[in-house]
Amino acid sequence: MTPVRYRRPNPLLTLVLCLISAVGPSVALPVPAMADRDDASKAAQAVRRAEALLENAGAAARAAARRLAVASAALPAAQHRVAAARGVVVATRVQAATARTRADAARQDYQQVTAEWTAAQERVAGARDRVTQIARESYMGSGSITRFNLLVSATGPADLMDRMSLVDTLVRNENAEVRRLIGARREARAAQDRAGAAKRAAELAEAEAAAKLHAAQTAQAEAVRARRDVYQLVLARRTALAAANAQRATVLVQYRAAVLAERKTRSSMRGWETRSGYRRQYHGRLLMPVHGWKSSDYGNRYDPYYRVWQLHAGTDFAAGSGTPIRVAAPGRVIQAGWRGGYGNYTCVSHGRVMGTSFSTCYGHQSRIYVHVGQYVRQGQIIGLVGSTGASTGAHLHFETRFGGAPRNPLNYLPPCLC
């Protein structure tokens, strides 16, 4: 399908063909005055130059509009990512700070419990020394002998009772030392367990704090990337918008100038047609101009960029590059050459139908075999299929024009398109 149908230059093309079709579709056409021919040639060249500018500006404007649409569509999502990333940064920073606080507390607990365990170990060592001394004295007999001597050396009943009380106190003290040793060992073992648990808790808290810190750093980096993406999108949007507006203004100014030139040229050519007195009628039927298949129809399409309806002024027939193009009806060549988005373009005037000039036109040719003023027979090869101009693939853009205005070619071609 050819991009020509979306062009601003179509009204200009309509004008030129409308005007040129009056130049003369038969061999017997009277020759116009030299001044008229020069004026018509200059007007046609001016319109072709304007059309080429419009074609390029229109394509650039549509490309800018597409860039603007893409950037505008992506901007809300990017802004949402920035907001989300900022929220994640705040949350992860809080989590990292909380984890660090827990890690510090766990580390302090570990240090305190370790100190308690060290003190318990010292108490165990002291109790063990005292119990060892008691055991040694009991083993050597000195302790028992001392207590026995203490009893037998009493001077009287009262003294004996006092000495028995002293011996009982000594025994209780020895038993207490043993119990303190057992308790110190138990306390030391519990302190050791608490120290191990505190160490593990501190290690877990440290790991959690490190993970939260890494998450915060990652979120911060994502926020930076998201902000950079938003900045790039905003910049792209501004650039595309400026380009689109500049191209739009350029196209509209050139379009208005071309329309004014079109009106002047149309008036000049109609005056020449009246003076020429040409009245030849065409009553034949059209032949298929190429062996191919219909790839795009004639009709209006809405251009969302300019907010106007644009006419695809012909029917496209897909065919291989180099396929012969045959003229659909006999007549005189009134246009043969480059025509902006149409690429290599040929128009043949066939005379008048119900008082209106009738012509067929052939766009995007790779080769043109005819020249302006040449008379061609129906079915004669006038060029080869190509993809010149504003085209995305090899095909023939075929038009039927009455008074220069395009009409649907399918109304005049064989129904079978064969």
Image (cartoon, rainbow, N blue to C red):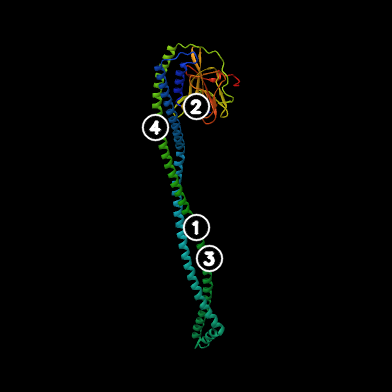
Residue closer to the observer: 174 or 231: 231
Mark 3 and mark 4 lie on one chain; the one further toward the N terminus is 3
Judge depth for marks 3 and 4 and give the one in front: 4
Residue closer to the observer: 376 or 95: 376
- How many C-alpha atoms fall within 10 Å of the one at disc 2: few (<14), some, or many (≥20)? many
Question: What label does residue 344 carry, if any?
Answer: 2
- How many C-alpha atoms fall within 10 Å of the one at disc 3: few (<14), some, or many (≥20)? some
Mark 3 and mark 2 lie on one chain; the one further toward the N terminus is 3
Question: What label does residue 207 carry, if any?
Answer: 1
Question: For residue 33, which quarter of the picture?
Answer: top left
Classify mark 2: helix, strand or loop: strand
Q: What residue type is labelled 1?
A: Ala
Classify mark 3: helix, strand or loop: helix
Q: Is residue 154 above or below residue 67?
A: below
> Are the residues tagged 3 and 2 within 8 Å (C-beta)?
no
Q: What residue type is labelled 4?
A: Ala
Q: What residue type is labelled 2?
A: Asn
- How many C-alpha atoms fall within 10 Å of the one at disc 1: few (<14), some, or many (≥20)? some
Question: What label does residue 246 carry, if any?
Answer: 4
Q: Which amino acid does label 3 sit on?
A: Asp
Q: Distance between the residues labelled 3 and 1?
A: 21 Å
Q: How far apart are marks 2 and 4 (CA)?
A: 29 Å
Q: Position of residue 134 (x, y in %)?
A: 53, 80
> Are the residues tagged 2 and 1 within 8 Å (C-beta)?
no
Judge depth for marks 4 and 1 and give the one in front: 4
Q: Distance between the residues labelled 2 and 1?
A: 73 Å
Q: Residue at x 42, y 16 (%)?
A: 269
Q: Mark 3 points at which residue?
A: 193
Q: In this view, does 207 lie above or below 306?
A: below
Mark 4 and mark 1 lie on one chain; the one further toward the N terminus is 1
Judge depth for marks 2 and 1 and give the one in front: 2
